[in-house]
Amino acid sequence: MKHLEFDGKYLDDLLSGKKKTTIRKFVRFKLGDRVLVHAGGKIVGEAKILSIEKKKIDEISDEDAKLDGFSSKEDLIAELKKLGYKDYIYVVKFEFKALDSVEPYKFYYGDESLEKIAKLAIENLNLSEEERKLLELYLKYKSIRKVASKLGGYKERGKVRKVLRSCLEKLKTEGLI
């Protein structure tokens, strides 16, 4: 599932329904996608993407600003410029549903340690060579970020997480966890 992340200062606006859009430099999702919503380092809900509109910054309306939780388009534009936005933006409208707030780690792994998942998977699962190598790197460095760095960079974190999550599910299915 994809993720939509917000600074913690937007949590109350999300929960109250005041914030119905977000403005982004680029988007990785498409119309109809369901995404997990993070605010302040926690998963606080899920959202359905209702629309994605590309606009020039100077085309932002007062309505865009209000739906994004700002009092005026001037306030929103000032914030965007502070964040380094220059020309085009994407206005993403979403339908938000609150969930019980949970730490992302617990959401995906429960109370299991990643080290335990990696060890049990190596010992008990039929893994590809790439999965085994990745898990061995995790056991060596004990950090998703460090493993991602060894695999080619920050963007590789998703690959590491995907393998660990897949192994956890297989271990549960086989009754090993």
Image (cartoon, rainbow, N blue to C red):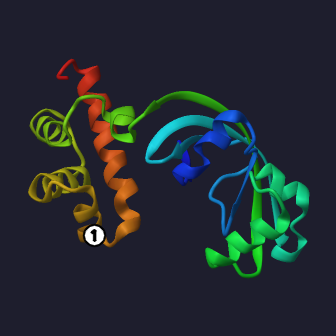
Out of 140 and 79, give the one closest to the viewer. Answer: 79
The amino acid sitting under disc 1 is: Ser
Out of 8 and 84, give the one closest to the viewer. Answer: 8
> Going by the image, does 111 lie left or right of 140?
right
Q: Is residue 34 visible?
A: no
Q: Residue at x 60, y 35 (%)?
A: 46
> Going by the image, does 175 lie left or right of 89?
left
Q: Residue at x 66, y 67 (%)?
A: 26
The residue wearing badge 1 is 149
Which class describes the residues within 10 Å of circle 1: few (<14), some (14-19), or many (20+)?
Answer: some
Horizontal and vertical percent position of residue 63 = 89, 55
Horizontal and vertical percent position of residue 75 = 77, 67
Q: Is residue 166 visible?
A: yes
> Going by the image, does 48 lie left or right of 125?
right
> Going by the image, does 85 lie left or right of 160?
right
Horizontal and vertical percent position of residue 79 = 68, 70
Out of 4 and 29, give the one closest to the viewer. Answer: 4
- State which quarter of the image contains the C terminus: top left
Q: Residue at x 22, y 43 (%)?
A: 127
On screen, 164 above or below 53? above
Q: Is disc 1 placed on a helix, strand or loop?
A: helix
On screen, 128 above or below 126? below
On screen, 43 above or below 56? above
